[in-house]
Amino acid sequence: MNEEMKSGPSPEEKQRLEKIAQEKEESEWLQDYLSRQPQEEVTTPEEAAELVARFEKLTLAFDAAHSLEALLSIEEISSDLAELYLNAPILDNPLRIIADIKTLEKHNPTHVPIYKAKIERLQSLVLNDEEKRIYNLRMAARKDYDYMNMILGFIKKCSSLPSDQVEALAKRSKTYSNAIGILRNNKIVHDL
């Protein structure tokens, strides 16, 4: 036990901590960028170039972190896994659960026990190893894609970029979106 403590965090833990730091940096950059921008569109070529460079960096990171083949291979999933996908935004945010309960207590108290039972049931679902692998793979890719897609939304508002460049970036984004797919009747559909 003492040897483990002296050796420091495991490689997986180091990677997780580095990813958290990178996400914080990306979030801070985006908040700063948004605070300096008008809501309509990005107008200067420098700002547009910065967004394109950020998008390119995100696509390279996505390619390095996620296998499109592995994502495309996910097709049939269990009903438990499908339910987790649908409720992931809630389950991943304990503060949202608390806020939802407080809102229900205020506006519809009879639904509080139903909501709490749903959360407890979702939190108690037991996935097999393959389902855990699929869930983690797809959710990590989805999170990275969502951030990339938000940057693309700003790029689309850039009046200083040629439309063919914007279309090429959108096409690249669509490749990732298709690989992640969408959930329909316990199936992940990739042909969007």
Image (spheres, grey):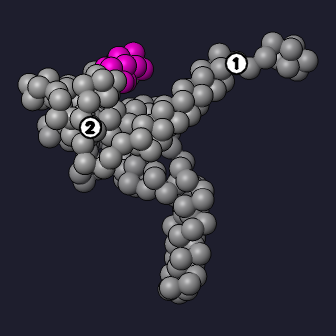
Magenta span covers which residues? 52-65
In the rendered image, which quarter contains the C terminus? Answer: top left
Q: Which residue is mark 2?
A: 42
**Left or right of 46 in this view: 98:** right
Residue that lies at the very extreme toward the left in this rendered image: 164
Give whichever of discs 2 and 1 has the lower sequence position.
1
Establish if 50 lies above or below 120: above
Q: Nearer the viewer, mark 2 or mark 1?
A: 2
Residue at (53%, 70%) from the top-left corner? 100
Mark 1: few/some/many CA within 10 Å (<14, 14-19, 20+): few
- Quarter location, residue 22: top right
Instruction: Identify the residue at the far front of this view.
Output: 44
Foreground residue, 31 or 149?
Answer: 31
* Residue that numbered label 1 is attached to: 10
Q: Is residue 134 left or right of residue 3?
A: left
Amino acid type, mark 1 = Ser
Residue 118 in view of the camera = yes
- For marks 2 and 1, give the CA distance: 43 Å
Magenta stretch, overall SS: helix
171 or 119: which is nearer to us? 171
Image quadrant assignment for residue 124: bottom right
Q: Is residue 156 above or below residue 117?
A: above
Residue 67 visible (yes or no): no
**Residue located at (32% from left, 35% from top):** 151
- Residue 157 in the image, given as x and y percentages of width and height: 21, 40
Residue 64 among those drawn in magenta: yes
- Which numbered tag is attached to residue 134? none
Q: Position of residue 184 (x, y in %)?
A: 23, 51
What residue is at 85 percent from the left and 19 percent from the top?
A: 5
